[in-house]
Structures are given as C-alpha cells and as structure tokens.
Image: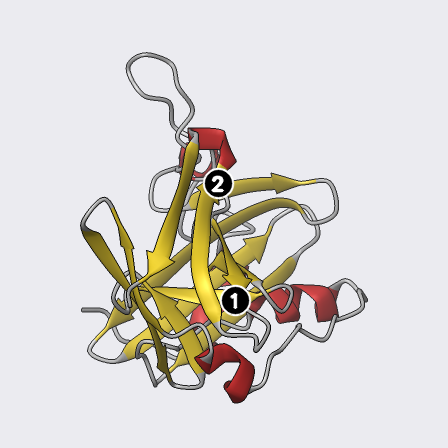
Amino acid sequence: MVNSNLIDLFKWDRALYDTTLVNKQDKKLIFASYPTDSGVETGYGFGWFIRNDSLYGKRVIHTGRWAGYLTILERHIDNDKTIIQLINVENKITTSPATFARKILYDQPIEKPFALTEEVLKKNVGIYVRDKEEKEIIFEFGRLWANNGQNELKPISETKFVVIGYRPQVTFEFATNDEGLAKSYRVQQKENDLDKTYLRKK
C-alpha cells in the first residue's frame, strides 16, 4: 500500500525521462511489451501497460485501487504529456475521466454522451429467460445493469446498449412493444460468436 500525492507523482514522472532513478537499459525493458514464452505480445512491460496510438504515440499506463480509492498514471512518452488522477471515491459507478483529459491535452472535441431518461431506461428492467437460465436487468444509480447488476449498460440508441469495460465489444439490443416496454433482448459479441436472445419472464 503506497501513498503519494500529485506533486510527488509528477516528480516521479519527470525523473523517468532521464537517468536520475532508472538507467536507459532498464527503461527499455520497463516500457516495452514483454512477450510470453511462446512469443505472444502481452502489452505489458515491467509494471506498465503499453499502448501505441497514431494520435497519442507511445503511452505507458498503470491504474490502482485500494480502500475506496481509484488512481491512474498515464505517461505519453513520445509527446511528453502526463495524466495523473487520484480519485478518493471508488464505488460501482466510479469511472476515470482520463479519456476526457486526453482529448483536452490534444485539443480534440469532447462529444456529449448519448443519454436516455429514467422513464425509458426503466422500461427495460425485468427478469429475462433463455433455456431456463434467468438474467435480471436492474436500474440502479440512474443506470441500467445487466447480469444481475454486474455489468453497466451504456446506451448508444433508445434500444441498443454496450457493456462498459468489455473488449471485444458486447452489445445488448432490446425489442419493445408499442408502449416501449421491452419484450426481449439480444446479447452479442460478434468476435466470439456470442449471440443469445432472452425473453422477458411473464
């Protein structure tokens, strides 16, 4: 359990651009994707997730959570930009605003997220069944949750949602009656051939 603050973490970030603490040879290992024994790239170095983007260049990232806290340190090595976030509230709906911070740093527009009213969202709430398997869609914290409250659903249209945090993307699409009440939903993850339809339980 390591405790720090923004100023000291920024000093740590600055020190990693020279050899004050870590020599060049070790930094090459730390900030490189380390392969498995079979040669498959992991996207993880020695303590850092490694990302390469056409816009952001090489990014090295790590997050943390402990005792109600959520943190992120993201270093854009090619462009000398750094995002440090220390969040002292961590619960079911806590999310990091790092995506917005990146857009601000690179002068990108921030799109307004698609949103639905509580009334519309609640029309999808219920228990759904497929081959005797029951799944519940619940409404909590002003949002929809699938798989008995385990996965948050983000709306991208009035009837279609994506599951937050899943790659490849998982979608839920609701079929509704004339009153807008959900009759069923179809869950798909095309890359893994997932395609199931659940009917609302009477």
At 27% across and 75% down in the image, what residue appears? Answer: 3
Measured from the top left, where is residue 72 in percent x and y? 43, 65
For marks 2 and 1, give the CA distance: 15 Å
Q: Which residue is mark 1?
A: 154
When the figure is inspected, residue 32 is found, relative to residue 140, above or below; the finding is above
Quarter of the image with the C terminus is: bottom left
- Badge 1 marks a residue whose secondary structure is strand
At 52% across and 87% down in the image, what residue appears? Answer: 119
Identify which amino acid the numbered label 1 is placed on. Answer: Lys
Q: Nearer the viewer, residue 201 or 195?
A: 201
Q: Nearer the viewer, residue 160 or 8?
A: 160
- Residue extending farthest top: 38
Give the quadrant of residue 135.
Answer: bottom left
Quarter of the image with the N terminus is: bottom left
Measured from the top left, where is residue 85 in percent x and y? 47, 74
Closer to the observer: label 2 or label 1? 1
At 46% across and 43% down in the image, what residue appears? Answer: 188
How many numbered discs, if any?
2
